[in-house]
Image (cartoon, rainbow, N blue to C red):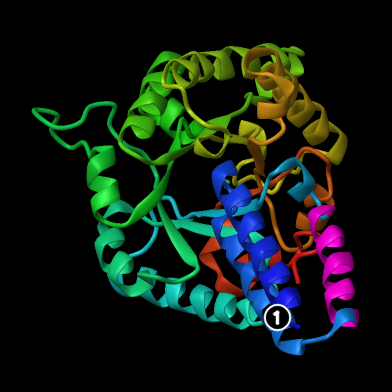
Amino acid sequence: MFSLFIHAWTNSLILFFICDLQGNFTDFALFRLLKAGFLIRMHSLPYMYLAGVVNSFDLNRKGISMGRRALIVGNWKMNGLIEITRGLAGDILAGLTNREKKRMMCEVVICPPFTGLYNLSEFLAGSALKLGGQNMSEYTAGAHTGEISGIMLRNVGCWYVLLGHSERRADNFEDNDQVGRKTAAALRDGLVPIVCLGETLEEREQSRTLEVIEAQLSAVLSEFSASKGKSHQLVLAYEPVWAIGTGKNATPEQVQEVHAFIRKLLADALGAEFADKIRILYGGSVKPDNAEKLFRLDDVDGGLIGGASLNASDFLAIIDAYPNNL
Ligand code: PGA
């Protein structure tokens, strides 16, 4: 019995470290370690066998065998005074806490306005709900009135930062090169950039979608490679501009075509094995009733959710729609 104990414990530790080295899976690995602990307490061979079967099934879950844990991100945009952001985050956290008791394959992040971050970082400290910023400066500090640096975002508890959202490209004239420089700055400051890519309706109608995506991505990849980033340090989000906040959906075929194209560009630039581990989210009018069919696509590893993330029950329903989530 003692040897069984040691066997299971060593296996789970090895798994933990392998996953941890891969960078993506600390939480996931911890979950498996705890599960192994539970099985050890069962003290019997059939349970050990069952653990093996369950574990191999786990690793074949969507994306996981590629080393990609699903990510669902709420982009609250310029919405929410302190009391409102606190209430909304509290409702989402309560829903997640109930789900954690079952099983959650997704990592969940909210990106409130800057003004809500400090308050929320104290409220969410140590919880399953992580924080991201909606933008950051390419500079570290200094005479840049009105800007917020990556270090400042880290300081208020952010793990992630959205970069190159189409609203910033349109309203603030951010171009591909600047988004690339911000990507390098985020990596330098210890944040995971979620870089948004997407074509306008006009560009799609002119059949320029893939060309536009390629130009946007290559500016990011040159900085990413130069920074020697690891696969878990970059997330991409395909958001067709014409589908954002409009209620218009890209069809699953359109989404998969672009996601597969992004994965191919990543493979060409970084190698197939590396590219397989980078998460690519879809965003643009994702709602509880269309989330599942988008999330089921091979190269969709989660979602960037705008309007629907401002309603806790809709956001939680979208999280539940991720295949194999519960
Ligand atoms: P939407 O926004 O879900 O409201 O379309 C998505 C986004 O802008 O990130």
Q: Quadrant of the C terminus?
A: bottom right
**With respect to residue 324, does 44 lie above or below?**
below
Q: Is residue 209 above or below residue 28?
A: above
What residue is rendered at 62% in x and 75% in y? 34
Farthest-out residue, bottom: 42
Instruction: Note whether 160 is above or below 313 in the view shown.
Output: above
Which image quadrant: the N terminus?
A: bottom right
Q: Residue at x 36, y 63 (%)?
A: 80
| Apparent side of residue 22 relative to residue 109 in the rendered image (left or right) | right
Residue at (22%, 46%) from the top-left corner?
Answer: 152
- Residue lying farthest left? 143
Q: In the drawing, does residue 262 fall left or right of residue 178? A: right
Q: Nearer the viewer, residue 284 or 141?
A: 141
Q: Residues within 10 Å of mark 1 (few under 14, many from 20)?
A: few
Q: Which residue lies under the disc numbered 1?
A: 2
Range shown magenta:
46-60
What type is the residue that disc 1 sits on? Phe
Residue 141 is a magenta residue: no
From the top left corner, tell me how far across and down residue 194 is, in percent: 50, 38
